[in-house]
Image (spheres, rainbow, N blue to C red):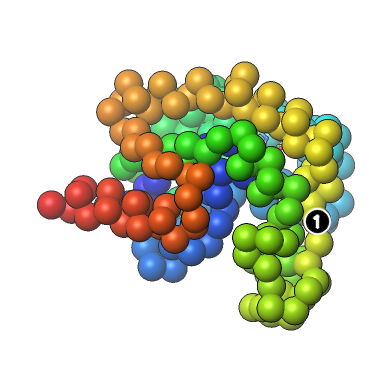
Amino acid sequence: MIIVLLGAPGAGKGTLAGAIKDQLGVHHISTGDLIRAEIKAGSVIGLEIKRYVESGGLVPDEVVTRMIEGKVKETAADKKGYMFDGFPRTSAQASDLDKVLAANGLVIDFALYMEASLNVVLQRLTGRRVCRKCGALYHLKNMPSRKEGVCDVCTGELYQRADDNEETIKKRIVVYNDQTKPIIDFYKLQEKLHTVNADTGAEDVRKALIQILNGKKS
Ligand code: AMP
């Protein structure tokens, strides 16, 4: 199964993937996570792309596509399938993803558009906290950890992403509307688009995805 998760920053793509990837047995590939890992490692690429992330802009297409290509090549043979989270984010990336998959004999099954309203994504992003150690996601109000500042899963420290400040969030939403939203039509044209209301809780979205998957099997 190959699924692409689409939606604004804060729509809940990472939370959904975290909640369902084990059940589906797919690889969860988040370009945001791959990019943050490069920056944290201080690699040549990491140093190059840091400024894009910090300003709320997009990392150049060829850099992210190369990352995805590497991950797919590394894992395609196990036939587990994928859940792409945060990729593609531009029309060029959407075409590139089809090509990268085709080169490995693979094709996207569907794209899930998680439609969320602006006030909901703003509230989610400003309150989001992430575990420094295992990457688990929390929210100060909607999904707090049992102990403040400490991850329930691994007791790692929770932190606020540098780009989850109000100014950068606004820029990321503008970038999303300009560059990412148009690719919804790319998947509509391919008749692969499913839309879910992502203003509801994470569990409702998970159930909606399961329903879509069950419909696919029958
Ligand atoms: P995310 O964790 O998905 O919210 O991504 C955080 C940041 O990483 C984004 O604001 C971009 O700067 C960068 N990024 C993540 N995925 C992509 C992508 N597919 N293309 C370009 N930049 C990306």
Please say if 86 is above or below 180. Answer: below
- Dot 1: what SS? loop
Nearer to the camera, 117 or 15: 117
Q: Is residue 167 visible?
A: yes
Q: Position of residue 139 (x, y in %)?
A: 68, 60
Q: Residue at x 44, y 37 (%)?
A: 113
Would you place residue 64 above or below residue 133 in this image? Answer: above
Instruction: Tell whether circle 1 marks a residue whose Cβ is less than 8 angstroms from ligand 1.
Output: no
199 vs 212, nearest the viewer: 199
Left or right, 49 with reference to 3: right
Q: Amino acid at mark 1?
A: Gln
- The percent coordinates of residue 108 (x first, y second) are 35, 40
**Pointer 1 local density, CA inside 10 Å: few below 14, some 14–19, many at least 20:** some
Looking at this view, is 166 or 60 the one in front?
166
The answer to which quarter of the image holds residue 121 is top right
- Give the side of residue 73 with respect to residue 32, left or right: left
Which quarter of the rendered image does ligand 1 occupy? top right
Residue 134 percent location from the top left of the image: 68, 69
Q: Which residue is mark 1?
A: 160
Q: Nearer the viewer, residue 126 or 28?
A: 126
**How far from the left and from the top, in percent, is residue 207?**
35, 58
Q: Is residue 113 left or right of residue 30?
A: left
Residue ID at (64%, 37%): 119
